[in-house]
Amino acid sequence: MAILKLYERLLSCKPSDGSVAIESEGDTIRGHTTIRLASVLAWKRLAALAIVVGGASSAFAIYTLGWHESSSRPKPTDASARTVTDAAGTHRVITLRYGDVVLRPEAATRCEASAEGGIPNLFCTRIHAGRYQVIFYSDTVLVWPLDCPRCGPDGPVFHYLWTPYLLRAGPKSQRIGALELRNRSRAVTYADALRVFGKPSSCDLLGNPLDSRAIWRSLGIRLKLATLGGLPPGKDACTAPRSMFIDTAYVSGTQWQPAKGLKVGLPVAAVRDLYPHAYQPHPDVGRPGPAYWIVHARMRCVVGICGSPVVTVPMLTASIRAGKVAGFFFPVGAQGE
């Protein structure tokens, strides 16, 4: 894993270069390991979710906790520490478990290994109150203003991607790069997609003015748009972006991949290796198949005829063609009802 770099005074949004260090002694907060963390360095050149620290004769690194994408919640792992010796000296690498806390009182900074919507993160705040929260994910860094009365759950927020071509899914979240499909205060619209991806290569009606398909060929993205509500007079499913909702999304561009590294063109064996809990259901109308459900969740059945009150539903599937991964499918179901 690459090294995480932060700018000094990150929480005040006034970046400047600095050094990083950590002390070896630890405390305990509510039964969790706590490590004293030092100053912050290098913000926009973020490389990975780790904090590198050094004491008088040693340096430490704190890496992101592990998590299985098919799980409905983060799985805590045992905190561990190992000693590594290289040309720079002897270092201790400390792996956080879910709920562990990192403190640096001299920098007034507290970070906790937590999760949002079932997706692991490192949640950092100023110890004695501050203006921002800084949240690190495997693909994104969010800087959230706390002194903004008009800010809602969807922003405004400073948003920085580790890589712009990451696909992510969990029980409460689905994301294509910077476009969040599910974990929002309202249903995701065609207008949201236009803000993130720009003008599509094409948008075509699917037999009626309330359904359409928008395609971004250079990105390898195809969105099926639908609505159960009305449209403004004289508008259709391609010309009323704020009234059209994303029903499904299909990603076939070779630049895209989930966090585990599965990509279009890899053999089907790679799916089984990276996602041992993935499985192939019977082909479903409206979904590309054959396919593996690589991220799935248990949810209450609220629509249709179900065999039990709680059912397994796909959050992200990998479609297979000729023994290779052909694309990734997100069943979103946001239709504005």
Image: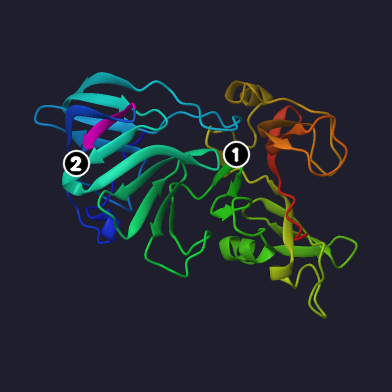
- Residue 116 located left or right of residue 174: left
Magenta-colored stretch includes residue 319 = no
Give the image location of residue 150, x and y in percent: 47, 70
Residue 200 visible in the shown view: no
Q: Which residues are magenta?
A: 31-36
Disc sitting over residue 170 in the figure:
1
**Number of other residues with Cα within 10 Å of mark 1, as a class: few under 14, some 14 to 19, many 20 or more:** many
At 73% from the left and 68% from the top, the residue drawn is 243
Rendered-image quadrant of the C terminus: bottom right
Closer-to-camera residue (139/301)? 301
Q: Secondary structure at mark 2?
A: loop
Give the image location of residue 137, x and y in percent: 45, 43
Give the image location of residue 86, x and y in percent: 20, 23
Kind of residue at badge 2: Ala
C-alpha span from label 1 to label 2: 33 Å
Residue 85 visible in the shown view: yes
Give the image location of residue 226, x and y in percent: 79, 60
Kind of residue at badge 1: Gly
